[in-house]
Amino acid sequence: MNISLYDLSVWVLPLVIAITFHEAAHGFVAHRLGDDTAWQLGRVSFNPLRHIDPFGTLILPAMLLFAHSPFLFGYAKPVPVNFRKLNNPKLDMVWVALAGPATNILLALVAALAFHALPWVPASSAKWVVDNLQNALVINVVLAVFNMMPIPPLDGGRVAVGLLPRPLALPLARLEPFGMLILIGLLILLPLAGSQFGLNLDVISAILRTLTGYVIQTVLLLTGNA
């Protein structure tokens, strides 16, 4: 697979912006709700270097890309949140978790609205701008949908822990140390194992792709692009 400098220029910029705003949003909402841990550590910032994880943001997605994985994913350095310092820990945890995906949906809406400004873009750079906006739309929706999976430490898992009654929330919260292993198993290992026996076990990826498609269509409809 040949990846050109042009490909990198239209994928890396929207990806870095999406991840940076996602993580900064978690820290900002936590700060407003009483926990200044991320604020004190300088993580409420639009500087991408404060959020990029060398392995999770760069190496892992590249490895999956070159391995023709059925689904690409990665992660940034998680913003530290001390839930005990929040004003209302159980409910505020939900708002902090939702802040990241909500910000990605807002960025997707901004990218889709920006399509209407394309007639004013110089012809020489129009293709580059279009590709960046299209990729920004897709990347932000994928990040939002993926992160809302109800598996800790993903945002959806934290939302579920915050909303579920204690008898259900505690067992789910205990999965957090194994969350990334569970995701790798569901998204990569299970489909690969199934392919060895002629079975399509790529169920989770199929659900995520379907949901992502619906959200993209909704964003395009809301912004007058559909």
Image: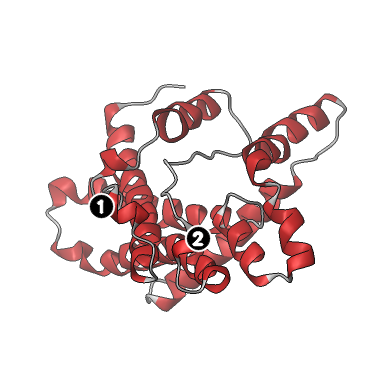
**Residue placed under numbered mark 1 in the picture:** 45
Q: Nearer the viewer, residue 164 or 213?
A: 164
Question: Residue 93's spot in the image, x, y percent?
Answer: 52, 65
**Kind of residue sitting beneath label 1:** Ser
Question: Residue 142's spot in the image, x, y percent?
Answer: 51, 53
Instruction: Tell me which corner region of the image, top left, top right, bottom left or bottom right, holds residue 120.
Output: bottom left
**Kind of residue sitting beneath label 2:** Phe
Label 1: how many Cα within 10 Å (few below 14, some 14–19, many 20+):
some
Would you say 214 lies left or right of 202 here?
A: left
Q: Is residue 130 visible?
A: no
Disc 2 is placed on an element classified as helix
Would you say 171 lies left or right of 163 here?
A: right
The answer for how far apart the CA atoms under marks 1 and 2 are is 20 Å
Question: Residue 62's spot in the image, x, y percent?
Answer: 46, 27
**Residue placed under numbered mark 2 in the picture:** 83
Q: How many marks?
A: 2
Would you say 113 lies left or right of 122 here?
A: right
